[in-house]
Image: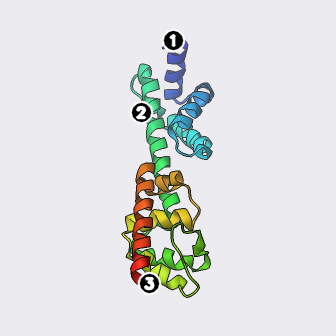
Amino acid sequence: MNDALTDLIIAAREGNPHALEQLAARFQKMIKVHCSLRLDDSTLVEDAAQEVTEQMLSDIRQLRAPEAFTAWLQQIIVRTCARYNRRNRNRRSREVDLDFEGSSKLLASLTERDVSCLPEASFDEEQTREQLLAVLSQLPTSQSTPLVLHYFRSMSYKQIADALGIKVGTVSSNISKAKRNLNRLLIDES
């Protein structure tokens, strides 16, 4: 670390408003780059970077050694981005209504959708939507949730994996199992 940066950090630590402004300007680009590398959602980069900068400026007095500044700043970036990622995952989960204690709510919401988009299942005129919903409710939630999200909410495997916090391969496997079980249950009902 060069002497000019050390002097700037010391002045900022002492509360010099000009030094605080310079420090924020000097590290703004670096903060944005690191936030963009750590955030799952690129639309949150500006907000996270602003929060990191604000925290850096408000907590600078707690920094004991100026030479530890970059490591200290990295910790702020990592914690802030982790918090944003957690919040964003929780928000996405709520948006797709994944409280599957009450999975019947989501299944009931499907009454508006066309069931013909389900593959490998034959529906004749007599089969009702309620029968399909009853069969879907017999599947384990680990299978019914991804199936419903993919075929009725038009979510990609990647979006489902992100929303549920599981791997894309697990989503694919669970949807395949759900389709097999759904077909078996539909055949047993006929």
Residue 66: give its label: none
Above or below 188: residue 74: above
Report which residue position mark 3 lands on: 190
Q: Does residue 119 show up?
A: yes
Give the left or right position of residue 17, taking residue 164 as reference.
right
Count of numbered marks = 3
Above or below 141: residue 155: above
Please report contact status of discs 3 and 2: CB closer than 8 Å, yes or no. no
Q: Position of residue 113 (x, y in %)?
A: 61, 75
**Label 3 vs label 2, nearer the camera:** 3
Q: Which quadrant is home to the C terminus?
A: bottom left
User: Between disc 2 and disc 1, whose residue precedes?
Assistant: 1
Give the left or right position of residue 133, taking residue 181 as reference.
right
Q: Residue at x 46, y 25 (%)?
A: 70
User: Between disc 1 and disc 3, whose residue precedes?
Assistant: 1
Three-letter code for the amino acid on which mark 2 is drawn = Gln
Give the spatial CA distance, label 1 vs label 3.
79 Å
Report which residue position mark 2 lands on: 62
Give the spatial CA distance, label 3 vs label 2.
71 Å
Please report contact status of discs 1 and 3: CB closer than 8 Å, yes or no. no
Q: Nearer the viewer, residue 40 or 114?
A: 114
Q: Does residue 20 show up?
A: no
Instruction: Label 1: state its secondary structure.
Output: loop
Q: Residue at x 50, y 84 (%)?
A: 130
Q: Nearer the viewer, residue 127 or 14?
A: 127
Q: Nearer the viewer, residue 134 or 15?
A: 134
Three-letter code for the amino acid on which mark 3 is drawn = Ser
Report which residue position mark 1 lands on: 2
Q: Residue at x 45, y 25 (%)?
A: 69
**Label 1 vs label 3, nearer the camera:** 3
